[in-house]
Image: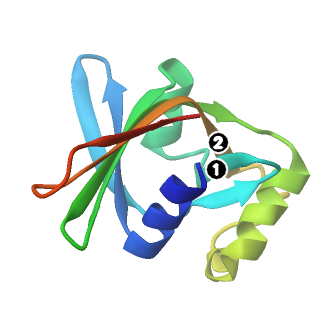
Amino acid sequence: MEKVYRFLKDAGTYYLATVDGDQPRVRPFGTIHLFEGRLYIQTGRSKDVAKQLAADPKAEICAFKDGVWLRVACRLVEDDRVQARKSMLDAYPDLRGMYDENDGNTEVLYLTDATATFCSFTAPPETVRF
């Protein structure tokens, strides 16, 4: 999990895919955070992505850096604890202009049932499960 975290953090931007009915939806994300041994992302509860994940928690993350790409198939589970939201916002203080751990909108979700695959054109794939 640490390798997945480091790759996503270093990449800066990754892409999160969700399902909206029968239509896939993909958008850029930038928050990735380790908290209490779990890997977390953050969004706003009022956004479509949060509604899509509430209806179907299956998601995929994809990122590319230095000739290597990472795909992570997972389920995203909301952690509604103030401590989890605060930890995320403390790690990304620029978000505090839009979010607060007590605003009723900030949502943090952790990855579970995750299968991460690192790929490139020059090395065999490496799979990590967490």
Question: How has the structure been colored for display?
Answer: rainbow
Task: Count the labels in the image.
Answer: 2
Instruction: Report the side of 30 relative to 18 (left or right).
Output: right
Q: Quadrant of residue 67?
A: bottom left
Quarter that holds the C terminus: top right
Q: Secondary structure at mark 2?
A: strand
Q: Which residue is mark 2?
A: 109
Q: Which residue is mark 1?
A: 40
Name the residue: 41% across, 32% down: 59
Residue 15: image tag: none
The secondary structure type at the circle numbered 1 is strand
Image position of 98 (left or right of 52): right
Q: Which x, y percent locates residue 92?
A: 65, 75
> Identity of the amino acid at label 2?
Leu
Residue visible at 56% across and 45% down? 46
- Whole-angstrom CA distance, mark 1 to mark 2, is 5 Å
Q: Nearer the viewer, residue 26 or 126?
A: 126
Q: Nearer the viewer, residue 36 or 98?
A: 36
Q: Evaluate if marks 1 and 2 touch, with contact meaning CB atoms under 8 Å apart.
A: yes
Residue at point 76%, 38% (across, down): 79
| 4 and 81: which is toward the camera | 4
Instruction: Decide if residue 50 is in sight here.
Output: yes
Residue 30: in sight, yes or no?
no
| Point 44% across, 64% down: residue | 7
Of all residues shown, which one is farthest toward the front?
Answer: 123
In the rendered structure, which amino acid carries the disc numbered 1? Tyr
Q: Is residue 116 above or below residue 121?
A: above
Tell me which corner region of the image, top left, top right, bottom left or bottom right, holds residue 127. top left
Q: Sequence-wise, which precedes: disc 1 or disc 2?
A: 1
Expressed as whole percent of the image width and height from the top left, the position of residue 6 reads: 52, 66
Q: Count residues near mark 1 (Cα–Cα under 10 Å), then give few for <14, some for 14-19, many for 20+.
A: many
Q: Is residue 101 above or below residue 10?
A: above
